[in-house]
Each structure stands twice: as structure tokens, then as C-alpha cells.
Image (tube, rainbow, N blue to C red):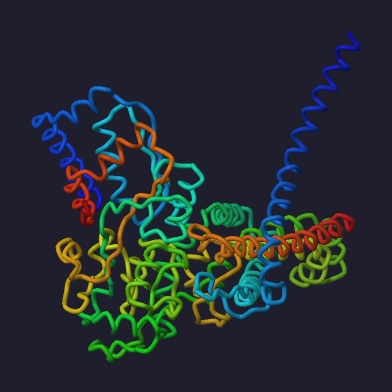
Amino acid sequence: MKNKKHLTETIIHGIFLILGLLTVGCVLLITIYLVISGIPAIREIGLIDFLFGKTWASTASEPSFGILPFLLTSIYGTAGAILLGVPVGFFTAVYLAKVANPKVKSIVSSAISLLASIPSVVYGLVGMLILVPGIREVFSLPDGASLLAAIIVLAIMVLPSIINVSLTALEAVPKEYEDASLALGATPTETYFRVSVPAAKSGIAAAIVLGVGRAIGEAMAVIMVSGNAPNMPSLFESVRFLTTAVASEMAYSSGLQRQALFSIALVLFFFIMLINAVLNFFLKKSKEEH
Amino acid sequence: MKRFGILTIAAALAVTTLAGCGSNSSSNSNTSSNTEVTGTVSTDGSTSMEKVIGSLGEAFEAENSGITFTYNPTGSGSGITAVSEGRCDIGLSSRALTDEEKESGLTETILALDGIAIIVNPENPVNDLSLEQIAQIYTGEITNWSEVGGSDSEIVLIGREAGSGTRDGFESITGTEDLCQYRQELTSTGDVITTVANNPGAIGYASLASISDTVKAITVDGVAPSEETVKDGSYVVQRPFVLVTKTDTPLSEAAQLFFDYATSADVEDILTGAGVVSAN
């Protein structure tokens, strides 16, 4: 009887182990596949020419594969989205965690969850039909599809991640800290910004890094508003991101062009890995603090 | 709504074509319907050919109830690769095969001719451009609509992504390969039409079959894009829709049946209904 029970336990453990390894297997498979398919083009083009080349003309009779425009666009676009999204997201989180009454909080929270669950193609569509013509009118440009349009769309898309993670971090600050601050005569606002926020800073940093990850990996919404011409980034110019460079040409690509697209994906993958490492660092720190 | 209308027409035509076959009772169509072939026909390739191949597939399935017809819209390049790797029966390409591709063991059969319409915003007063002007506009020599008789506003060049069959067709016809100064490179015909419809200064190109009322197709050298002008060659911005097959591997029975059907004279009305001009 006891032996049988032991056997069942072992089997169940085994099943769980296999399921767990399945995820690891997927990650390994994708990583290995990306590296194997991404390396040949980099080797053929040359790492320096690939990363720092300023011209991308993949189907030209003398093709050139320089991804510096995409790299810089991705970096500027993400930075812009974070610059716009973080202040809004951060103050919203402080408001929801500390100031808002429960009724307001529940309405705002559900609106934020809704914002998070809107598919990115819808963001792109609304951006394409409202934001792009809007930017064209407001700045009297010939065309509104630009880095600015992508930044605005991305800023809205990163809001839910920033708000939700910051909110969790702020709510986890022990109430005693705030009570002590209040008892010492600090006003509520002073307490929020001098005590609660510093206590939750690792969590808030994690929220920002998560936002960066979301922004840098977004393709669908961006492809619809950024114009996709492989220009060097400029706020009102049509630009192409790392993600959209892969997505827009993959369907019809062949030969070295296709291999180069895999190389772009590999570069993007390294970016995401880096961001994940930073995220883990902050999350770990945040855990240690509490 | 318009698309639905076209489908209805295509379906109606298919039915009349069928009825025609029955009454003629030619020995050929009798044997094919008697033997009741079963199986699947898989096609893969050009997204520009969606409407054409969709209408053909629908009519073909109605005629041969035992056969399942599939179409995978991946793009001309992918379709050609797919057929050469044996992942589909018939590849669909909206450009002629290169000599390289033919040498690798592929055969092209021109199914239809598709006009590429040059589209502008309906508010744009320009109605006609020469092929040379179009080339100059796309290469950035002409940058303002006033230079070609329009209002004083910058020309916004809308194009397709590198590798697209429509882009390849447009650039090779206008002689602007690798020279186009695109403001936007979009990934589908629908996106191009939407963008042009939303920007008064925009010019774009799209398959004639997909043009809707939201944009204006201009005349090229005085010739309006239409089925007649594409077929008689007077409208110069046109390209072939090609069925790609393997040269030495015979098609499956079902695929051969579809191939014969698609290249027969019976389908002319279906092709016309889908906005292209039959080549057979």
C-alpha cells in the first residue's frame, strides 16, 4: 500500500518535471534556432557593417544590410515612450495606492486592466486612423506616420504594465513606515513621496524595466503608425523599428535577406535578454528589501 | 459590401458556367465529373492573388464536391519556395519567374494579367500622369503636386515593403528599382489604400482588383486602368499572375483537375469578376 502511494508520487513528480522542462525546452529551442539562423548573415555581412551600417536596402541589386537606423529607432522610440509613459504611470500608481477612495480606485483599476487587454492591432488601427492624420494636421506635415506617432502609441501601451507593477510595489510598503512618518508630523503627501516611494523604489524600477521590455518588443501597433521607411530616426520622419524590420519583410523574403532578418531578430533577442536580466535584478532587490 | 457583391457575382457566374458545361455535355467534362476525384489541392503564395484564387477555388469546389481547395496567402516568394519544396501543389506568384527559378525546375503558367493602379486621394485634382512622371515622382525628382498640375503640397510616396510582388511589379515597370524614396512602406494592399484615402497629398500603387471608391485611380499616359486596357496592353502598368508548378513532378489528380480548370476558357467570367484579365 505504502509502496503504491510512493509510486504514484514519483509518477506525478515525473509529470510535473516534464511539464516544467517543456518551457525550458521551448526557450532553448528558440534561442538555439535564432542563433543558428542569425549567425550566417552576420558572418557574411560582417558584425560592424551589420550593426553600424546606415543603409538598409535588402532587395536592391547591390544590397546593403545596415541596421543602425532600426537600432537607434528602437532605442529612441522606447526611450520616448518611457519618458511619456513613466510620469503618467507613476503618478497614477501613487494616486491609486495611497490617495484614491475605493470607488474611484476600482473604476480606474478596471479601466487599466481593459487598456492592458486591448489587442495591439487595435492600438495600431486607432493610431493609423486618428493619431496619424492628427499629427499631420497639428504639425502641418506632409504625412503623420512618424516616430512621434509610434512613441505616443507605445507610451499608452506601456501604461498598464507600469501602473500595475508600481501599484503592487507601493501597496506592499508596510503601513508602519507611513504611520511613523505621519506621527512625526509629515503631511500625507510628504509621506507618500519621502517614505512610501523610496521604500518601493525597486518595484517601481522593475515596473519601468517591464515597460521598456513591452515597448521594445511591440511590432503590430508600431508597424501601422511608423511608416516603415528605413530612415535614420527623426521625430517627424517615417522610421522602422527592429521588430517591424523583421515583420514587414519576412513574408516575401528570400536568401541573404531572410537570413539578415533572423539576425535582426537575434539582436532584438539580446536586447530583451538584457532587459530581463535588469528586471530580475530589480525584482530580487525588491524582494530582499521586504 | 463591394467585395461581397463581387463574390456573389463570381458565385453566380460559376453556377452559370457549370450549367453551360452540363448542357454542352462535352465528353471531357463528363469524364471528370463522373470519376469523382477526391483529395485536396493546396495553393500557396501571392497575397495579391487572393481575390482571384478565392473565386476560382470556390467555383472549383462547387463543381468537384470531393476536393478540398486551400489557399495560403504567404507572398510570391514564399509560394515559389513552397512549391519547389513540395509543401503545396501549386505556387502562386504575382511576378514572372526568374531564369534562376526556372532552371531550378519550376514551370510558370500565366493565369491572368493584373493592372497595377496608381492611386491618389479623391481630393487630389491630378487625374493623369505619364509613366515618366510617375517614375520621377517615385525617385524624388518631382516632390510637389504643383509640378504635375496639382495643388501646392508635398507629394507623399506610399509603397509596399521590399519583396512584395506589387512593389516589384511597379518598380520594374516604371524602371525605378532601388530608387524609390518611400515615405511609407506598408505591408498590405489594404494598408496602402487606407493610407492614401486618409492623406490628401499621398500617391500609392495597388492591384487594380483591390481598388475601392475611397481612392482615385489616375490615368497613365491618358489610359485609364481597366480590363480592356490591360488586356490590349495599352495600360502599361500591369503584371502577370502566375501558377507555378514543378517541371518534372506531375501534379496530383485533384491538382491537375484544378490546373486544367483554372487555365480553361470557362473561367474567364470568374477572372473578370475578380478584376483581372484572363490570359488564356
Residue B251 against residue A118 in the figure, above or below: above
Pick the residue in front: A168 or B64.
B64
Determine whether, in the image, residue B241 is placed left or right of residue A184.
left
* Residue farthest to the left, as pictured: B23
User: In x, y percent, where is residue A93?
Assistant: 67, 62
User: In x, y percent, where is residue A179?
Assistant: 84, 61
Determine whether, in the image, residue A4 is placed left or right of residue A115.
right
Q: Image quadrant for the N terminus of chain A?
A: top right
Residue B88 against residue B149 in the figure, above or below: above
Pick the residue in front: B230 or B110.
B110
Q: Is residue B126 visible?
A: yes
Q: Quadrant of residue A15?
A: top right
Q: Quadrant of residue A49?
A: bottom right
Counting labels gives 0
Q: Image quadrant for the C terminus of chain A?
A: bottom right
Determine whether, in the image, residue B42 is placed left or right of residue A92.
left
Q: Residue at x 58, y 56 (%)?
A: A112
* Residue farthest to the top, as pictured: A1
Q: Quadrant of residue B136?
A: bottom left
Pick the residue in front: A214 or A19.
A19
User: In x, y percent, where is residue B122?
Assistant: 23, 74
Q: Is residue A83 visible?
A: no
User: In x, y percent, where is residue B258?
Assistant: 30, 38
Q: Residue at x 73, y 55 (%)?
A: A168
